[in-house]
């Protein structure tokens, strides 16, 4: 059974940092893409970042470029999202996702097969 378990969310002041983790288990993810999405109250779930386990460049939505960094640790089967210079508009429930998809699908929710339960990030002004 595939499981994605997020952790690391919390309350932080604007300008602060958080690192989210996503521990993956239940199958071999070597051919998969790992993504982070977020959903704020009353809004659609939106793409944040993605990275392939096999290598290649990461992808980011424009609003987080230069502030967020996605990375992976194959030995731990864990993906991270380092978030710096946080803004109140980054407040959302952050989800980890996994899917066997091509790069043209990285930013699309429907391309991902597995989802975690989410971890809340709240940025105060």
Image (spheres, grey):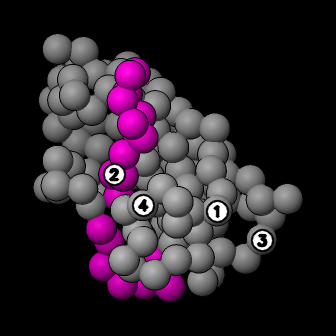
Q: Which residue is mark 1?
A: 113
In the displayed structure, 5 sits above or below 61; it is: above
Q: Is residue 28 left or right of residue 75?
A: right
Disc 2 + disc 3, Cβ < 8 Å: no
Q: Is residue 60 magenta?
A: no
In the displayed structure, 57 sits above or below 51; it is: below
Query: Given the current orientation, which residue lies at the most extreme right position?
Result: 1
Front position among marks 4 and 2: 4
Q: Residues within 10 Å of mark 3 (few under 14, many from 20)?
A: few
Q: Quadrant of the N terminus?
A: bottom right
Q: Is residue 49 magenta?
A: yes
Residue at the (39%, 79%) spot, across then down: 103
What segment is highlighted magenta in the picture? Answer: 39-59
Residue at the (42%, 61%) spot, across then down: 108
Q: Which residue is mark 4?
A: 108
Front position among marks 4 and 3: 4
Q: Residues within 10 Å of mark 4 (few under 14, many from 20)?
A: some
Q: Which residue is mark 3?
A: 27
Residue at the (58%, 43%) spot, across then down: 6
Q: Secondary structure at mark 1?
A: loop
| Residue 12, x across and y down, in percent | 31, 22
C-alpha separation, residue under disc 1 versus residue under disc 3: 12 Å
Mark sitting earlier along the chain (1/2): 2
Q: Which residue is mark 2?
A: 48
In the displayed structure, 2 sits above or below 12; it is: below
C-alpha separation, residue under disc 4 versus residue under disc 3: 22 Å
């Amino acid at each position: 059974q595939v499981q994605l378990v997020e952790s690391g969310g919390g309350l932080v002041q604007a300008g602060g940092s958080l690192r989210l983790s996503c521990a993956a288990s239940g199958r071999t993810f070597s051919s998969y893409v790992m993504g982070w999405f977020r959903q704020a109250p009353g809004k659609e779930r939106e793409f944040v970042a993605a990275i392939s386990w096999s290598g290649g460049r990461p992808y980011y939505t424009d609003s987080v470029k230069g502030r967020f960094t996605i990375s992976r640790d194959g030995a731990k089967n864990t993906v991270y999202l380092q978030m710096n210079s946080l803004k109140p508009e980054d407040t959302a429930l952050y989800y980890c996702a996994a899917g066997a998809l091509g790069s043209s699908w990285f930013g699309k929710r429907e391309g991902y097969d597995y989802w975690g339960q989410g971890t809340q990030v709240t940025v105060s002004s």
